[in-house]
Image (cartoon, grey):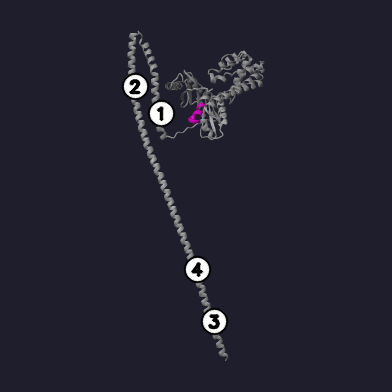
Amino acid sequence: MIGVMTLSGVAGVVVGTGISYLWLKSSAEKRFAHLEYEAKAKAKAISNEAELLLQETEVKLKAKALEQEAEFQKRMAEVDERNRALILQRKELENEEEKLASMQHRLLEREEQLEALEIQKNEQISEAVEKLQHVASLTREEAKAFILEKVEEQSRSEVAAIVRKYEKIAKEEAEKKANYILAQATTRYAGEFAGERLINLVNLPSDEHKGRIIGKEGRNIKALEMLLGVDIIIDETPGVILVSSFNLYRRAIATRVIEILVEDGRIHPGRIEEVHAKVEKEFEQKTYEEGENILIDLGLFPMHEELIKLIGRLKYRASYGQNALAHTLEVAKLARVMAAEMGGDEKLAMRAGLLHDIGKALTQDLGGSHVEIGAELCRRYNEHPTVVNAIYAHHGHKEPDSVESAAVCAADTLSAARPGARREVLESFTKRVKEIEEIATSKPNVQKAYAINAGREIRVFVNAQKVNDNETVLLSKEIAKEIEEKVQYPGEIKVSVIRETRAASIAR
């Protein structure tokens, strides 16, 4: 009985265990099926997302490829355009070369014609000379001179017109070809020494003012350079322009005129003339006041007002690189000390020292020797004879006739000879530039002449009523030839002859 119960219990356990196993198996299968379903769903979602990313990547790659293709086409179009431009330029250059060759051929033909005409002219002159010999009983040389004078008078204008015409044609053709082949560059250099004494800087509020200073078609800068007698350099340096001239007084006036025009803002030829006249008066007054202050400091009153003005103007003059006013004051003080030691008149020695170089204030305007100019000024304004003698004696024109005059000579030598006082380079440069101006002003009908651009150019202004356009060509050649013969200089000097006509009326 017990065994039966045991077997039935075991059977129940087995049956329960089997049922539990079957239930657990069924439950596990359901759970695995659910997990499998979720895994498949996630895998499908990942697959869909991967497909979307792949499609987006393909779209971006296609867009990038299209963009690169467009850029490539654009670059190819630019290359084609450049090639076409180069081909056109090459054709233009070939055309210009053909034109230039044709022009050269025509010029050669013209030269041959001129040579033939020259031979014919000489033959006619010879015939005319023989006839004059028989008719007028003139010698051969007299008849020849008479004929040549008449021929020169008649042919001067014709020759000038021919020269001007063919020079203009050749220049235009050469410039056209050069513009295609060479890039123009301009270099301006001035070392520390030259810049200090030959150039003034004018600061501008902005680069816009450079265009206003140049003006429409360059009329403002032309008016400034013609009126002021300086070279105005406008380059790429921001905020500044350069005023160049060997004449310190002229350069100082020009600098002040430009500063006033820039501050005022009104820049045109009429205003330029008005400001220039005003600044000239201001400088005259300023130089007088400076001379007056020097005389007060030295206790040398009275003195004629013209001499006082010239003393102040010495500030704008240099000799061998030494400022003339500083040199003059140095000589006056040294002369006073030496005269006192030798028992002379201190005041008279100082006065003679102050006036010994007074002529230098006018040499750049009048030319000639500063000794002669200074002596004449002092005689005119009733200075003491010892002062006049000191002016002559300090350069050996006369012997010193007093202690005071000898003191001035010694003081002048000491001031000039001390180390670092003078530099030969500037004086030789100034002398050369002055010689160039004097050659130009010595020609008939020349009103003004200014050496500019560090002596590499001279601008000559002629009387428009007496000189025509053709004669300006011959005048420029005459001046250039005389400069070549008389002046030693490095490089080249450009001679520009300017003829200008003005008309002015007043509306009342």
* Vertical position of residue 309 compared to residue 80: above or below: above
**177 or 44, nearer to the observer:** 44
- Start and end of the magenta stretch? 215-223
**Which percent across, then down, holds residue 54?**
45, 59
Give the residue type at disc 4. Ala
Task: Please name the residue shown 45% across and 59% down the image.
Answer: 55
- Identify residue for label 1: 171
Badge 1 vs badge 2, beta-carbon distance below 8 Å: no
- Identify residue for label 2: 115
Give the residue type at disc 1. Lys
Sequence-wise first label, 2 or 4 = 4
| Distance from Cα at disc 3 to Cα at disc 4 | 32 Å
| Distance from Cα at disc 1 to Cα at disc 4 | 92 Å
Sequence-wise first label, 3 or 1 = 3
Which mark's residue is nearer the viewer, 1 or 4?
4
Sequence-wise first label, 1 or 4 = 4
- Identify residue for label 4: 39
Sequence-wise first label, 1 or 2 = 2
Mark 4 Cα shell of 10 Å, populated few (<14), some (14-19), many (≥20): few
